């Protein structure tokens, strides 16, 4: 399969990336096509759709061996289910699937068409295999059952982000960071209220602790100033 392009996001590290696309609508990204595919004709008509599917590569999670069962993080990291009943990155083939909002398409003299998207759950530089339009009348199934995800879909943390720390971030990035933190980036089996975690986002290291269902930001460090 050919890599048709790469997505550029504010995530330089896997830790902190939402576990599903669309959970944090404020997250922004742009897809730049590989030279072979930088023709406006390839995206003609795509601007008519509000959402698109991305097929992509788990480029940082490739392993020689795969496991038939995995432990979904939202089930406390203790319950095992079949790999094909999850969206775990540790799969026989490292292929990801995301539904994102297509905000706009711009054109660059050198880069060709650029797709600007929101709600993306991808690491910066992730290879993209394909782009397809999201078609509501076939892709939306209102009567679909949720399986074990019904138990966890409402999960979220209360975020205490002191104003003087939040203001260290660019205004256009603040909503995205709040959304990321509310989703609880920690592994499900971590419950140490004294432990300090750090999410790298948009050139900043956002450090926090979690006690129960409350997340408290304790520092924001500009990585460029280190």
Image (spheres, rainbow, N blue to C red):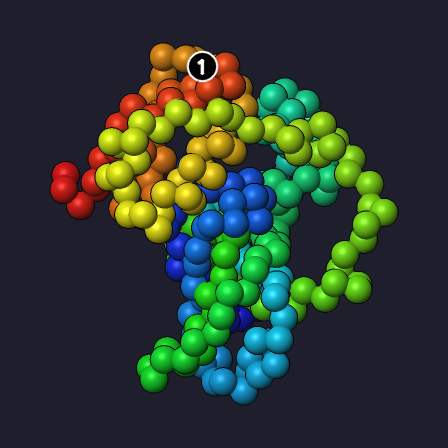
Question: Is residue 78 left or right of 166 when viewed as pictured?
Answer: right
Residue plotted at (81% across, 50% down): 142
| Quarter in which the N terminus is drawn | bottom right
Residue 186 visible in the shown view: no
Question: Is residue 110 left or right of 65 when viewed as pictured?
Answer: left
Circle 1 crowding by C-alpha within 10 Å: few under 14, some 14–19, many from 20: few
Tell me residue 171's x, y (percent): 31, 47
Q: Nearer the viewer, residue 64 or 105?
A: 105
- In the displayed structure, 24 sits above or below 29; it is above
- Quadrant of res 91: top right
- Which residue extends farthest front? 163
| Quarter in which the C terminus is drawn | top left
Residue plotted at (44% across, 55% down): 28
Tell me residue 5's x, y (percent): 46, 69
Residue 116 visible in the shown view: yes
- In the displayed structure, 41 sits above or below 56; it is below
- Quadrant of res 44: bottom right
Quick one: SS at disc 1?
strand
Tell me residue 116's x, y (percent): 46, 66
Residue at which label 1 appears: 211
Question: Is residue 224 left or right of 217 when viewed as pictured?
Answer: left
- In the displayed structure, 92 sits above or below 82; it is below
Tell me residue 135's x, y (percent): 72, 66
């Amino acid at each position: 399969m050919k890599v048709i392009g790469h997505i550029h996001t504010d995530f330089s590290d896997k830790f902190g990336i939402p576990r599903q696309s669309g959970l944090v609508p404020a997250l922004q990204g742009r897809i730049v096509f590989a030279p072979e595919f930088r023709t406006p004709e390839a995206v003609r008509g795509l601007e008519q759709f509000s959402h698109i599917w991305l097929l992509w590569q788990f480029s940082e999670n490739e392993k020689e061996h795969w496991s038939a069962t995995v432990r979904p993080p939202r089930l406390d990291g203790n319950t095992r289910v079949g790999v094909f009943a999850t969206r775990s990155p540790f799969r026989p083939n490292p292929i990801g699937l995301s539904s994102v909002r297509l905000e706009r398409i711009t054109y660059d003299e050198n880069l060709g068409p650029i797709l600007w998207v929101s709600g993306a759950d991808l690491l910066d530089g992730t290879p993209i295999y394909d782009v397809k339009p999201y078609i509501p009348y076939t892709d939306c199934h209102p009567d679909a059952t949720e399986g074990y995800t019904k138990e966890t879909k409402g999960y979220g943390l209360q975020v205490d982000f002191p104003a003087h720390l939040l203001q260290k971030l660019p205004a256009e990035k603040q909503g995205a960071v709040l959304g990321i933190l509310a989703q609880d980036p920690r592994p499900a089996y971590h419950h140490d209220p004294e432990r300090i975690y750090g999410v790298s986002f948009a050139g900043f290291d956002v450090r926090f602790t979690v006690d129960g269902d409350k997340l408290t930001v304790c520092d924001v460090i500009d990585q460029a100033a280190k």
